Amino acid sequence: MKIRFRKVDESNWREVVALSVSKKQKNFIESNAQSLLEAAYDVSFHWQPLALYDETCLVGFAMIGAKQGKEMWLDRLMIDEKFQGTGYGSLFVPLLLNFMNEHYGVNRIYLSVHDENEKIIPYYRRFGFIDSQQYDPENGEHILYFDI
């Protein structure tokens, strides 16, 4: 297993858009197509879409950005339905956190989750994310943060 990520570009965007979560998870995360549109048009947030690979096999997608000072968002993270439960998420979360710290010099990383996604808050707590006890006013999602 050799995990890595690279920018989404004209060579891989169609594959990224084809990735999907399970039907029961679809309400928990925006589609990758919507994320790529957001990255293209919400330019003030400087979103960076990332394709997640194991060797040459595309397994997931992430999007980071909205940096303000020493804080930044891990705005999207998804593993394709057929690769869920295989440990990829647990490998990519620390890789992304380290990348954000090393390349952007942040000391706090935020993410938000739907309360209905009961498994996700304990999942992110395993990596050191803390429940802020606050909700994102734009989408009503629960905000977690990670201090580096």
Image (tube, grey):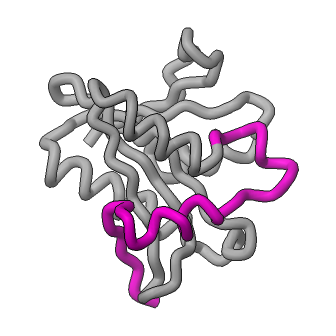
Which residue is outermost to the right?
A: 24
Quarter location, residue 56: bottom left
Which residue is outermost to the top?
A: 137
> At 39% across and 39% down in the image, what residue appears?
39
| Nearer-the-camera pick, 148 or 83 | 83
> At 21% across and 36% down in the image, what residue appears?
107
- The magenta region covers 1-30
In the rendered view, tell whether residue 32 sits above or below residue 73. below
In the rendered view, tell whether residue 133 sits above or below residue 148. above
Asked if one can make out residue 130 in the rendered structure from this viewpoint, the answer is no
| Nearer-the-camera pick, 116 or 53 | 53
Asked if one can make out residue 74 in the rendered structure from this viewpoint, the answer is yes
| Nearer-the-camera pick, 39 or 93 | 39
Residue 133, percent from left and from top: 56, 17
Quarter location, residue 10: bottom left
Residue 37, percent from left and from top: 48, 40
Quarter location, residue 16: bottom right
Residue 77, percent from left and from top: 53, 51
> At 39% across and 51% down in the image, what residue appears?
49
Task: Assess whether residue 120 is covered by the magenta stretch.
Answer: no
Residue 63, percent from left and from top: 42, 47
From the viewer's perspective, tell me whether residue 1 is left or right of residue 134. Answer: left
From the viewer's perspective, tell me whether residue 92 is left or right of residue 77. Answer: left
Task: Count up the numbered dots.
Answer: 0
Q: Quadrant of the C terminus?
A: top left
| Nearer-the-camera pick, 140 or 108 | 140
> At 53% across and 25% down in the image, what residue appears?
143
In the rendered view, tell whether residue 146 sits above or below residue 6. above
